[in-house]
Image (tube, rainbow, N blue to C red):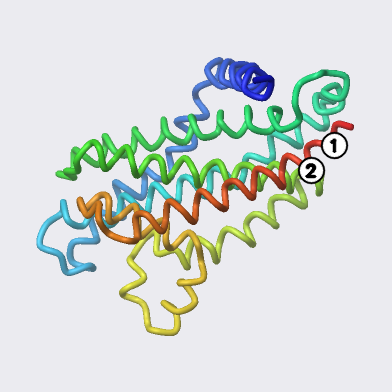
């Protein structure tokens, strides 16, 4: 199919650009590593759990979701740079599918996120985190859907605002309450009832709960499948919307 061939071409180009300067993968993972090393050791007493391993099974999934959300939402800055350089303008004369122009970039972001997630997970193993590899891979699928959704949204918004000065405060305004209400650092079960009620309307809280269920080995938990379904639906909607914005920009 043409869409698959076009997406593969764009993805290959974007990955070659990423691999030419892989330092950005490690720059993106620096802040989560600091949380892992300097914040997570405080959690055993704070969460009143019996071991560090149990604390990390709670904290690491939230940290990975944080990485997926935050990393995806700020991918739009690269799109604005491409707009300014005329790359998007020159795309008008190519026969490449407009959906592929978006998907190739977003899939690059997903791969970058998964590379960072692997680094975080391997470091957590040094702190006695133990989790079945199959459950980790399913958790990575959840992260991939989150990254696909947030990067597509960021690209779509970037095509609308066309300015870093507008994109930065907008993304921060959206990201802050979304992250706090998803229970990424501490489970929302510790929150008062009214805050838990508000968090239930945050789709990312379902993703965090589902990822935590996988890390504790509870594959049958409804949180897992509800989180995957919600993230898949939102990812599809975000890609469709962003692809339309992309099509308008390259007509």
Residue sitting at 87 percent across and 25 percent down? 92
Q: Are marks 2 and 1 in contact (CB under 8 Å)?
A: yes
Where residue 64 appears, as percent x and y from the top left, is 39, 47
Query: Looking at the rendering, in which quadrant would you find the N terminus?
Result: top right
Secondary structure under tag 2 reads helix
Q: Which mark is residue 79?
A: none
* Nearer-the-camera pick, 157 or 53: 157
Residue sitting at 82 percent across and 26 percent down? 85
Q: Is residue 124 left or right of residue 31?
A: left
Where residue 189 appears, as percent x and y from the top left, is 32, 73
Alpha-carbon span between mark 2 and mark 1 = 6 Å
Q: Is residue 207 left or right of residue 37?
A: right
Where residue 194 appears, as percent x and y from the top left, is 44, 84
118, above or below 215, in the image: above
What residue would you read off at disc 1?
Answer: 249
Residue sitting at 72 percent across and 35 percent down? 79
Q: In the picture, residue 30 is in which quadrant?
A: top left
Residue sitting at 41 percent across and 40 percent down? 141
Q: In the picture, residue 74 is in which quadrant?
A: top right
* Mark 1 Cα shell of 10 Å, populated few (<14), some (14-19), many (≥20): some
Secondary structure under tag 1 reads helix
Q: Which mark is residue 245?
A: 2
Q: Is residue 166 left or right of residue 194?
A: right
Where residue 26 appears, as percent x and y from the top left, is 45, 31
34, above or below 4, in the image: below
183, above or below 228, in the image: below
Query: Looking at the rendering, in which quadrant would you find the C terminus?
Result: top right
* Nearer-the-camera pick, 103 or 131: 103
């Amino acid at each position: 199919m043409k869409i698959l061939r076009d997406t593969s071409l764009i993805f290959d180009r974007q990955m070659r650009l990423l691999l030419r300067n892989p330092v950005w993968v490690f720059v993106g993972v620096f802040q989560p590593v600091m949380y892992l090393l300097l914040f997570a050791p405080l959690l055993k007493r704070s969460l009143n759990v019996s071991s560090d391993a149990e604390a990390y099974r709670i904290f690491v999934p939230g940290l990975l979701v944080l990485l997926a959300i935050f990393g995806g939402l700020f991918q739009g800055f690269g799109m604005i740079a491409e707009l300014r350089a005329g790359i998007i303008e020159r795309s008008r004369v190519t026969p490449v599918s407009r959906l592929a122009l978006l998907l190739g970039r977003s899939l690059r972001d997903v791969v970058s996120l998964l590379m960072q997630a692997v680094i975080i997970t391997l470091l957590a193993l040094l702190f006695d985190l133990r989790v079945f590899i199959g459950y980790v891979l399913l958790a990575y699928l959840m992260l991939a859907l989150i990254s696909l959704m947030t990067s597509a949204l960021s690209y779509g918004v970037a095509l609308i605002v066309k300015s870093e000065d507008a994109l930065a405060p907008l993304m921060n305004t959206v990201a802050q309450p979304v992250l706090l209400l998803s229970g990424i650092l501490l489970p929302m079960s510790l929150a008062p009832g009214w805050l838990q009620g508000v968090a239930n309307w945050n789709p990312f809280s379902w993703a965090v709960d589902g990822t935590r269920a996988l890390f504790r080995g509870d594959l049958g938990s409804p949180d897992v499948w509800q989180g995957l379904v919600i993230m898949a639906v939102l990812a599809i909607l975000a890609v469709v919307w962003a692809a339309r914005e992309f099509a308008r920009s390259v007509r």
